[in-house]
Image (spheres, rainbow, N blue to C red):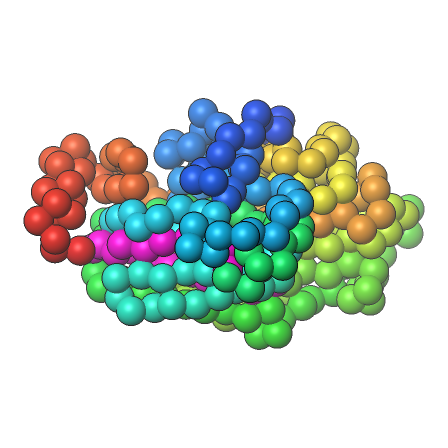
Amino acid sequence: MNSSTVQKAIKEICRKPPQHWVGDGFLVYPVFSNKAFTQELSPFLMFDYAAPKEFPPQKNLNRRRGVGQHPHRGFETVTIAFQGEVEHADSQGNNDVIGPGDVQWMTAAKGIIHEEFHSTEFSKRGGVFEMCQLWVNLPKKYKMKKPRYQPILAKDIPSVPLVSVNDEKQVDNVCTLEEANAKIISGEFRGVKGPAKTFSPVNLWIVSLSTKAKEFELEFVEGHTTLVFVQKGGITVQGKELNLADVAIMDRAGSKLVVKATQKNTSLLILSGEPIDEPIAARGPFVMNTDKELRQAMVDFQRGAF
C-alpha cells in the first residue's frame, strides 16, 4: 500500500435497523434509516435490503406476493436479485423477470407506474428469496426526462479481481477472482466499466471476499459519497467491525479504504457517487426539488399523466 495515499475515515456506522414489510413479498431492513432522503448520502436516497427468507409454494397464483401498481417520479430505482426472482411491469410496456445476480435499473424521471412481485415461477415452487432496492436521485435537469428501463443480466456484469495489501512489504498483490472480486454494475473500478448507464457519476459494486486472511484496498473519487454495506458475513473497514445489514458512511475526504472479511464468503455492496448539490423534496413515491413540484407530481398522477 502506498503510504502517501489518503485513506478515508469512517464518518458513522449505521447498525442493522428493525425489519418491516413492503407489501406482502418483501421483508426488508430500511438500511439508511433516518439518513434516508438526506444530503449526507446524496446521490443515494433510500436502500431496502430483504435478507434471505424462505417462502412456501403459493397455491393461489392470482394473488402473488409483492407490491401492486404504484407511481414514481424524479429518481431511479435499482433492484438486485440475489436469490429467487423478481417480476417487474410498468406503464412504459416493460415486463421482465430478474433472477440471481440480475439487476433492473429503472429511471422513473417524469413519471412511471410499475409493480413488483415474486415471479410466477418462483411463486409456484417457493424457496429462498433475497433482494435489495436502492433509490438514486436524479439531478434537476433530468427529473422530467422520459422514463428508461435497463435490464442487466448477471452474465453481462464484469468481475474484477481485488488488490490485497501487505503493509510489512509495502507491496500490492492482485488476487484471483476466486479469492476476492468486485462485480461492476455501474461506474468503474481498476479500469473496468459497468454496463449500467447513469445520469451522474454512480459506482455500484458487489464485492465478494472468500478469505479472512487478507486485507483489500478499494479506490474512489475523492469528494464522492461512499457507503459500505454488508450483505453477507462480516468485515472490518478501516479497523471497525461491521456485520449483516450494517452500513459504514465514509468521509468524503480521502480516496482509499481497506476492508477485511471476518467471515469466509463475505459479500458487500459498495455505493459511491457524486453528491447532487440540490434541494431534496421527498414525499411517498416522488422525489423532486420543491414542495410545489411534489404537489404537481400528485396532480399529474391523479389526472393520468404518468
Residue 34, x across and y down, in percent: 45, 25
Note whether residue 42 is visible: no
Residue 251, x across and y down, in percent: 55, 35
Name the residue: 48% across, 66% down: 97
Q: Nearer the viewer, residue 237 or 154?
A: 154
Name the image quarter holding the C terminus: bottom left
Residue 38 in the figure: left or right of residue 171: left
Q: Nearer the viewer, residue 121 or 16?
A: 121
Q: Nearer the viewer, residue 183 or 166?
A: 183
Name the residue: 57% across, 42% down: 50
Q: Main secondary structure of the magenta part?
A: strand
Name the residue: 35% across, 48% down: 68
Name the residue: 54% across, 37% down: 28
Residue 180 vertical position relative to residue 47 in the rendered view, above or below = below
Residue 301 in the figure: left or right of residue 73: left
- Verify whether residue 15 appears in magenta: no
Residue range (magenta) = 101-119
Residue 27, x across and y down, in percent: 54, 37
- Verify whether residue 105 appears in magenta: yes
Residue 161 in the figure: left or right of residue 120: right
